[in-house]
Amino acid sequence: MSQHIQMTVNDQQVGPVEVPEGLKMIEFLHEYLNLTGTKFGCGAGVCHACTVIVEGKNGVSEVVRTCISGVERFADKKVRTVEGHAKRNSEGEITELTPVQMAFLEHFSFQCGWCTSGFINETTALMERLAKAPVAAADVEQVIEEALKEHICRCTGYVKYYQGVKDLILNTKGLTY
């Protein structure tokens, strides 16, 4: 059995595309769109390496795990993968990284990089939420812990990711009061 799916991925219209029923979104990204930056980690939705951002119609983004979500969940939605963050020129070359990507580079937050796409997407969604609803500077560490606590990194012990996010939030105007 198959189904036709269409969505917007990284500002590009996709579909309608015929896909098998039950196809996981991570497989769709890898096999149909050749977007392999979203990583398959545990396959059970536990590690969060596979997260992408789904832009809500109300302007609020949510992070969704693709290894446990069927592609049909994303039908007619706007999806951002890790490949959709940096600015590119007409040849597709990266010309500018986002503040989140720069913060992680500056803090050397990753080692193997397997979990990085999930951390980038989660932190990007967090930054977007904070732009709409700033938090007290004293609560930043708690907010970061709540946002990132389910992401698993087997290399760094999380300290560098958390420090990068903390510095970014505290140094971005309008996210705290």
Image (cartoon, rainbow, N blue to C red):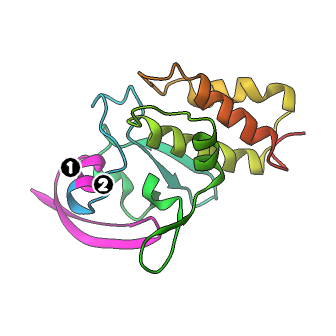
Between marks 1 and 2 in the image, the one whose residue lies nearer the viewer = 1
Q: Residue furthest right?
A: 177
Is residue 150 within the magenta segment?
A: no
Residue 9 pos. (x, y %): 41, 64
Q: Secondary structure at mark 2?
A: helix
What span is colored magenta in the figure?
Answer: 1-30
Q: Residue at x 56, y 35 (%)?
A: 108
Q: Residue at x 29, y 55 (%)?
A: 29
| Quarter the N terminus occupies | bottom left
Where residue 72 is drawn, which disc sits there? 2
In terms of depth relative to the viewer, which is nearer, 78 or 96? Answer: 96
- In the displayed structure, 133 sits above or below 115; it is below
Tell me which numbered mark, 1 or 2, is placed earlier along the sequence. Answer: 1
| Numbered label tally | 2
Residue 132 pos. (x, y %): 76, 51
Where residue 126 is drawn, which disc sits there? none
**Amino acid found under the numbered disc labelled 2:** Glu
Quarter residue 33 falls in: bottom left
Quarter residue 50 falls in: top left
Left or right, 94 with respect to 71, comes to right
Q: Residue at x 60, y 28 (%)?
A: 160
Is residue 15 within the magenta segment?
A: yes
Whether residue 81 is visible, yes or no, is no
Residue placed under numbered mark 1 in the picture: 23
Left or right, 36 with respect to 112, comes to left
Q: Residue furthest left?
A: 1
Cα distance between the residues tagged 1 and 2:
8 Å
Left or right, 17 with respect to 38, comes to left
Whether residue 48 is visible, yes or no, is yes
Q: Secondary structure at mark 1?
A: loop
